[in-house]
Image: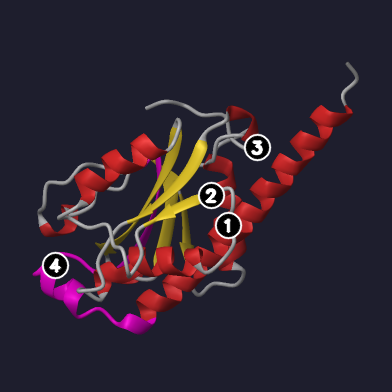
Amino acid sequence: MTIYSSLFEKKDLPTRIMYDEQLASYRIADSLANFLPSVHSNHSIVFICIGTDRSTGDSLGPLIGTLLNEKNIAPFSVYGTLDDPIHALNLEERLEEIKTSHENPFIIGIDACLGRMKSVGAIQIGEGPVKPGSGVNKELPPVGHIHITGIVNISGFMEFLVLQNTRLSLVLNMAKIISKGIYHTSLRYMHTSEIKDYTLKERPI
């Protein structure tokens, strides 16, 4: 894996945050900022939100994409919404389109996943891609230089039905917290970019 310089000097280990803990969105922003490339790197920051609204548990990604599109998160780009989802049937094609549309993209893959009972509601941010479809034994390409995943239900038995019967309330609340965290990150990133531009303009020739 390529190592990118981050907004801060040190990358954190994978972070796990419960969606309902105090200041969860700010903790997401803190963690995510540590993994993003510096504004000096000239990478395009692209969020790919994977999933479908045809399955409650698998709708986390497109819910996040939809909520992000309702906010101004420039200079970030977002793909995968309820109206235009990225899922198993179109994932490879959409990945090629996205990589062609962006110069040197740094991709954050977002997806729902299953886990242990005590981990339901946990949000994880870390290096490496998401592996969509692995919970239901599908072979799909990995997505992202880093990942954001949300554990929406328990794994171990009839995963497809478990995803279908996941509570929408949980998924929606997790989506709101994650999208808010990404929004806070975009504000920090934009602020850092403005400082960079100001410094360049003020630098004597």
Tell me which amino acid carries mark 1.
Ile
Tell me which amino acid carries mark 4.
Glu
Tell me which amino acid carries mark 3.
Phe
Q: Secondary structure at mark 1?
A: loop
Disc number lying in front (1 or 4):
1
Residue drawn at 15 percent across, 55 percent down: 89
Residue range in magenta is: 144-169
- Identify which residue, 95 or 26, lies in the foreground: 95
Horizontal relation, residue 167 to residue 108: left or right: left
Q: Is residue 90 visible?
A: yes
- Give the number of the disc on residue 76: 2
Tell whether label 1 touches label 2 (CB within 8 Å). yes
Q: Label 4: which residue?
A: 159
Local crowd size for mark 2, using a 10 Å CA cut-off: few (<14), some (14–19), many (≥20): some
Q: Is residue 31 above or below residue 112?
A: above
Q: Is residue 159 above or below residue 89?
A: below
Horizontal relation, residue 196 to residue 6: left or right: right
Inspect the magenta stretch and tell me whether residue 160 lies in it.
yes
- Identify which residue, 99 or 135, lies in the foreground: 99
